[in-house]
């Protein structure tokens, strides 16, 4: 369930760094390497519901850590692109099953993999949409899975 807390101004680089710590904590026990690519400039302000956005990206990281093979890798890339804020999570696991790609993180996804991934992806999609953004899922060339949570950047300034 989404937190009813109002959006607040967040230091985007610090928020991404905190997500990086979470990613490391999720990946290390699974024997998966984690990398944070924090492309947010110092002082960039992100206007969002901290708890919801944090949980949404954490869900993507948890899925990636679970499906990446031992010795594999998960990368969280945070950057501005075309007026949007992106949180992209990529792993080198088996990729999303076809039913997950078709459902795109909808609540009633079916199939074994959907039962394990579906609720977290649904929450991430719901959070993105509540901020005027989107969630895109793909199996990129070269293998693995990619989930991109995109939000409108909104006003940029000091938090």
Image (spheres, rainbow, N blue to C red):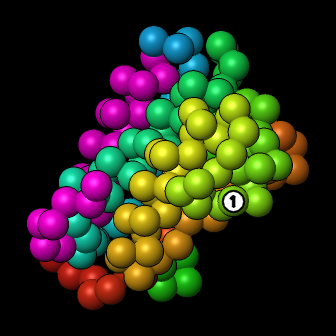
Residue ranking furthest to the right: 141
Q: Quadrant of the N terminus?
A: bottom left
- Main secondary structure along the magenta-highlighted residues: helix
Q: Toward the viewer: 141 or 67?
A: 67
From what the image shows, is residue 38 above or below residue 41? above
Q: Is residue 27 left or right of residue 54?
A: right
User: For numbered disc 1, what is the local secondary structure?
Assistant: helix
How many dots with numbers?
A: 1
Residue 53, horizontal then vertical, whole percent: 32, 58
From what the image shows, is residue 154 above or below residue 111? below
Residue 112, horizontal then vertical, whole percent: 69, 32
From what the image shows, is residue 85 above or below residue 149? below
Residue 15 visible in the shown view: yes
Q: Which quarter of the picture shows residue 65?
A: top right
Residue 145, horizontal then vertical, whole percent: 71, 44
The residue stretch that appears in magenta: 1-28
Q: Which quarter of the picture shows residue 91?
A: top right
Q: Residue at x 46, y 16 (%)?
A: 28
Q: Residue at x 58, y 60 (%)?
A: 106
Q: Is residue 64 left or right of residue 131?
A: right
Q: Residue at x 15, y 66 (%)?
A: 4
Residue carrying label 1: 103
């Amino acid at each position: 369930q989404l937190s009813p807390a109002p959006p607040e101004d967040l230091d985007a680089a610090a928020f991404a760094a905190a997500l990086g710590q979470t990613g490391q904590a999720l990946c290390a026990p699974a024997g998966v390497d984690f990398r944070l690519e924090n492309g947010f400039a110092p002082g960039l302000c992100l206007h969002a519901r901290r708890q919801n956005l944090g949980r949404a990206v954490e869900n993507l990281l948890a899925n990636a850590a679970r499906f990446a093979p031992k010795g594999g890798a998960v990368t969280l890339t945070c950057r501005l692109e075309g007026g949007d804020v992106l949180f992209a999570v990529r792993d080198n696991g088996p990729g999303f099953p076809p039913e997950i790609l078709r459902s795109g993180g909808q609540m009633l996804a079916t199939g074994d993999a959907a039962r394990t991934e579906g609720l977290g992806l649904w929450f991430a999609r719901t959070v993105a949409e509540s901020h005027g953004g989107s969630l895109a899922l793909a199996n990129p060339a070269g293998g693995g899975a990619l989930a991109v949570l995109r939000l409108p950047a909104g006003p940029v300034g000091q938090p």
